[in-house]
Image: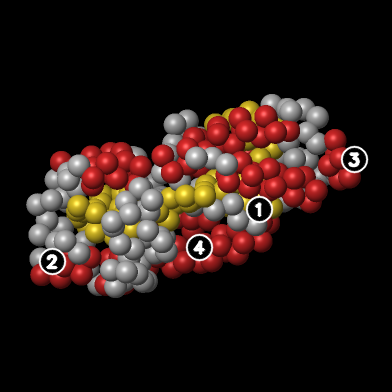
Amino acid sequence: MAVHAVPRFARAQTYPDRPVRMIVPYAPGGPTDVITRLLAQKLAEHLGKQFFVENVGGGGGNNGMGRAAKAVPDGYTLLVVNPSYVINPTLYDRVPYEFEKDFDPVTLAVATTLVLTVHPSVPARTVEELVVLIKAHPAKYSYASPGTGTPGHLVGEQFRLSLGLDLVHVPFNSAGLAVGAAVAGHTPICFASPSPAAQQVVDGRLRGLAVTSKARSQALPDVPTMAEAGYPGIAGDNWQAVVVPSGTPREIVALLHREIVQIIALQERLAALGFEPVASTPEEFARRARAESETWARVIQASNIKAR
């Protein structure tokens, strides 16, 4: 890890005095990009300087996260991440960062649950019925996810492993494509976020069996949680969090946290975009990141998943 000398207090007192870069380690248009642009606009309005988004895609997010890890820790580089931040160190043989050493957490800003859906032709109206059906027909059923190593894939593998199911994973390149395949009946089961799936459930093109978060989704209030369905061990969600290079002055981290929490609290658009507000403390996000890293590492290793 690179060590940079930063005059903490002088910089913190005048921050920001120039534009601030917000790195998104994925292509434009996805959930991380959407929430980053919302935050950038509001942070600029609140703090009086431009916050601009830089998309650094490639390597499953590793390229952008590696670039941010090498940035000077002066508060002028922020990184906005999703669970790949804690998944990739196990999923890939090598990654250009160590999340606990190279970054300081600011906040887990928002979260999005995952929803287990089935095509209406599947004769299962509950998770229990689906488990019985899959066990009665080994190797017959497959499930779609937004891609290898995504939360949808890992929760699907958690479902398969913990219940001893003979279930084939079919990865797609986005949640929209995965849901589309389920709607068409090509992959009759799907684990994906509500944003592409909720309207399909409302319209009857898919049947929602459960969401994988602790609480029900605002987008699908009639769909039970996995715990309510009798499977509390199947849990996980997608989230968007803000971190900064390790060593960023604490005063700047505190300022960014305070501003982002205020922005999240006032954003009525979040539910429409499929996000649930969280606005955690830095310490809460650090604990969650460590716990999820351990959880998903066990699933990845048990399923022998490797990024291609």
Q: Position of residue 288 (x, y in %)?
A: 56, 62
In the image, taking residue 45 as reference, residue 222 lies left or right, namely: left
* Image: 155 above or below 49: below
Q: Nearer the viewer, residue 173 or 258?
A: 258
Q: Residue 36, which numbered label?
A: none
Residue 212 appears at what percent x and percent y? 36, 60
Q: Are marks 2 and 4 in contact (CB under 8 Å)?
A: no
User: SS for tag 3?
Assistant: helix
Task: Return the mark for residue 105.
Answer: 1
**Residue at left offset 70%, top offset 33%:** 46
Helix, strand, or loop for circle 4?
A: helix
Distance CA(mark 3)–CA(mark 1): 22 Å
Rendering coords of residue 190 (x, y %): 25, 51
Using the image, tell me which numbered label, if any, was put on residue 10: 3
Q: Are marks 4 and 1 in contact (CB under 8 Å)?
A: no
Q: How far separated are the C-alphas under marks 4 and 1?
A: 15 Å
* Residue where numbered disc 2 is placed: 133
Q: Earlier in the sequence, mark 4 or mark 1?
A: 1
Q: Position of residue 249 (x, y in %)?
A: 80, 48
Q: Which mark is residue 292?
A: 4
Q: CA distance from mark 4 to mark 3?
A: 36 Å
Question: Which comes sooner in the sequence, label 4 or label 3?
Answer: 3
> Which circle's residue, 2 or 1, is located before the other in the chain?
1
Kind of residue at disc 1? Pro
Pointers 3 and 2 in contact (CB under 8 A)? no
